[in-house]
Image (tube, rainbow, N blue to C red):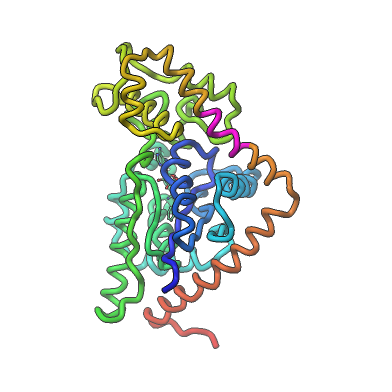
Amino acid sequence: MGKQRVLSGIQPTGDLHLGNYLGAIRNWVEIQQEFDSFLFMADLHAITVPQDPKLLADSTYKVAALYLACGIDLEHATIFVQSHVPAHSELAWLLMCITPLNWLEDMIQFKEKAVKQGENVGAGLLNYPVLQAADILLYEPDKVPVGEDQKQHLELTRDIAARLNYQFGSETQPILKLPEPMIRAAGARVMSLTDGTKKMSKSDPSDLSRISLLDPPEQIQHKIKRCKTDPVRGLQFDDAARPECHNLLSLYMIFSNQSKEAVAQECADMGWGQFKPLLTDTLITALKPIQEKYTQIRAEPGYLDAVLHDGKQKAEAIANFTLNKVKQALGFSIPT
Ligand code: TYM
């Protein structure tokens, strides 16, 4: 039997941060030997909120370079750009026609983003999860490794696939495979540095709320120095009244590769003045090799173009096969 397949993606909007790394990329790297991985840059998703056309292509390359710099290995993984594979948009349209409107109106991310955009909400923002369902279903993955915030979109993906199977397939011959989410406990929800009750996000207007993977050491130091804490002495996990404390300890635990018990013991009597430099040094040390590799990759002319060209070929072969299967089931004529 061949390897199982995983698929996941990140939007090339803003700089990737610790949440993107811990919720997604780090897990892709850890499981890549066991799976056949398809990883992409969701540039079609990016334009559901306004983007500067001068920056979109470069941001897409930046994310591809970060995947590689974080340790994605092309021996196990295919990296591609969503918009290079037109089957994503095409399947999204077909799925949109079978998705009830109220399923989309119930999506938490739609509601949150729609509030932020006020009157200017584009139809793309509402249909965003259908495009995500298409991204996933085209590759018939076994698992979709993501952070906690994507759980609802994955449930919707399964619902859309089940509806298509029910309407156009048969019980013995489903058309689309239902994927399983893969959400790891540690790092699945990294919180903002300025408010421990909000998730760390690329779209937060304050840069102080997140640490980006490419932040230089001085900036990491500055952000940790300024991050929100509390006046309590002694640091503990899991105190609901101290969300910032839990978040910062969790970051330290993950990046220093220690167990929760070891960190709880080490930090039990510390004050923030002692803990913050420890966390700062740990983050700087952990991000240094990623930043160095990133610089190397970006300096090599033509390398990313070649990676993405190859990725497009491999992705397209699978995506077009699934798209045709769906079109046939829906009754379209297929050109000879
Ligand atoms: P995006 O670009 O917002 O985030 C990319 C990945 O990072 C995870 N993530 C986090 N994990 C932990 N803590 C956080 N604070 C945090 N913030 C973000 C996300 O869960 C995600 O795994 N819609 C998707 C992109 C997408 C996609 C797909 C993902 C498009 N099509 C198909 C999987 C499969 C998104 O906006 O992710």
Q: Nearer the viewer, residue 282 or 37?
A: 282
In the rendered image, the quadrant that contains the N terminus is bottom left
Q: Is residue 282 left or right of residue 309?
A: left
Q: Residue at x 59, y 58 (%)?
A: 74
Q: Is residue 132 left or right of residue 63?
A: left
Q: Residue at x 37, y 31 (%)?
A: 250
Q: Is residue 165 magenta?
A: no
Q: Is residue 288 magenta?
A: yes
Please say if 299 is above or below 208. Answer: below
x and y, in percent, of residue 6 in the image: 43, 60
Q: Nearer the viewer, residue 173 or 37?
A: 37
x and y, in percent, of residue 75 in the image: 58, 60
x and y, in percent, of residue 160 in the image: 31, 64
Quarter of the image holding residue 249?
top left
Q: How many marks?
A: 0
Quarter of the image holding residue 188?
top left
Q: Nearer the viewer, residue 329 or 256?
A: 256
Q: Residue at x 31, y 76 (%)?
A: 174
Please say if 39 is above or below 172. Answer: above
Q: Nearer the viewer, residue 52 or 121?
A: 52
